[in-house]
Amino acid sequence: MSVNRRLSSSLEMTSTRAPPSRRGSELRMTDRRGSGYSSAGFSSRRPSIDPSRLVPMDKTTHVGGTDNFNVVFIGAGNIMFGSDEGPWNHSFRFEHKLGLRLKVVAIVDPAIERANAVLKQKRDSFVVSAYQNTRVFKTLDDFVKNMTPKERPRAVVVGSPPMFRGTLQPGRDVEMQIMKHFPGVAMFIEKPVATGPKSEIDEGFTIARHISDSNSICSVGYMLRYLKAVQKMKQIIEENGLVVMATIARYAAAYEAITKPDWWDKSRSAGPIIEQGTHFCDLSRYFGGEVDISSVIAHSLEWDEEAGHLSKMGIDESKIAPENRIPRVTSATWKYDSGAVGSLMHVATLQGRNYSCELEIHADGYSLKLVNPYVQPILYVRRPGDDHEQAYTFPDDDPFFSEISNWIDIIEDIEEDPEAAQILSTYEDACRTYEFTWAIREASERSRATKLAARRSATSVAEEVLAEEENEA
């Protein structure tokens, strides 16, 4: 995805005051801000964060302290170290949040050459102190076997492809392995939690229970929840006591710029709703609440239908098995447990590089419309008594930094206003989004199967009639 955001213009979850004091981890998990726990259990209706707390990174100071903050990066790809395709770059945010305290003790990636290449770039830059003693390992087990006591991580960041995690299967159970070797260690895990077969969804919820039981501070990378615009929307809803009546999501991808064959192959990426549309499915849940999975209805435009032809694909789709080729359009509707209604339209139709995305939230008297959340978010608000929309802009917003900053503040148990930091996407909550995206994919495939069956039936009847006519003749 092409964006024009400068990485140096970031948002911070903490205030501009001097770094607050830290205490150890003596708090029970249920006492910690952002643990995701309440007397009612987990819910997608997470507490919001005051948008005024989301200030640019260059207006804040690093987290104070002299102790090292050891981190293990699992994955040496774009999400961890950046690319020209978008603003993702977790290492960049860690460097700015922790400053000289950051010590990346290990990079774990089976692609050793790639890991060593990014490590060399870091050592040749001004952040060399964070990577001077970093070691590269093919597997987590290799790191554990060779780790010294001083290298024990305080946090683990999982940015490996989702097809290799989120299950209990050997080789695809990195979360369980992390908890086995480092009980209670904090984890940041990229979204979606997995892209395996639907039959493995329950394994994700099992992992979520293990994470909760381990008291690990775990955050999943649904960064759009941390957008200043999104938190402004939550603020308006909460301050006016609104009940969401409808959510309308639209996601138009610029397919010409997507040149990774895996993205076009459902057997590897699980399809565009699960891999890409997951962000807007998650935001829909964030505002609408839990989804009645049994109510999901969906239709798709497939590659082999007359309207499904794409003229500027950057990959050779003929190398992908026909049954694994992705839909060009998916349209879904559903009911929330509250009775509200939701809808999503995902299309892979745009050329060029920029995407076009919008989310509308409707309540009695109010319309909240979020436009262009990935590049330069604009929020349009219509209120009772005024037919005109008020526009809010949020320059230099960086939700990638905000989610990392927020997570680290909670790990550090920083003494601030209890409302300052909250985990907005726990692992269990992310599993519910994953389950929801699978429900949309399955509903669209059922719809297609029904249509194809009806077409075959009609063809069979027509052939029988033709045969009878020929016999009579």
Image (spheres, grey):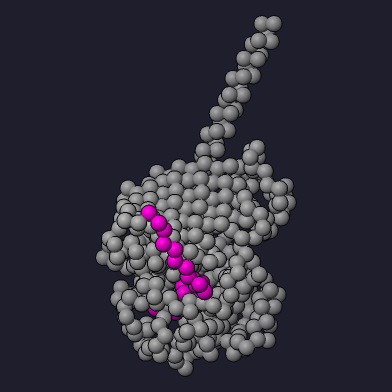
Q: Which residue of the protein is positioned furthest toward the top in this rendering?
A: 473
Quarter of the N terminus within the rendering:
bottom right
Give me the residue at 58% from left, 71% from top. Answer: 5
Give the camera-side residue of 232 and 166.
232
Residue 125 visible to an observer of this rendering: yes
Q: Position of residue 87 (x, y in %)?
A: 58, 70
Q: Which residue of the protein is positioned furthest toward the left in this rendering?
A: 39
> On screen, 363 above or below 297?
below
Q: Is residue 48 left or right of residue 139?
A: left
Q: Is residue 291 magenta?
A: no
Determine the image quadrant of residue 424: bottom left
Quarter of the C terminus within the rendering:
top right
Give me the residue at 60% from left, 87% from top. Answer: 127
Determine the image quadrant of residue 195: bottom right
Q: Position of residue 402 (x, y in %)?
A: 46, 74
Give me the residue at 68% from left, 86% from top. Answer: 124
Q: Is residue 401 magenta?
A: yes
> Disc count in the image?
0
Q: Is residue 53 left or right of residue 174?
A: left
Q: Which residue of the protein is positioned furthest toward the bottom in this rendering?
A: 66
Q: Position of residue 53 (x, y in %)?
A: 40, 77
> On screen, 325 above or below 133?
above
User: Magenta part of the protein: which range?
Assistant: 387-412
Q: Position of residue 401 (x, y in %)?
A: 50, 75
Give me the residue at 55% from left, 66% from top. Answer: 375
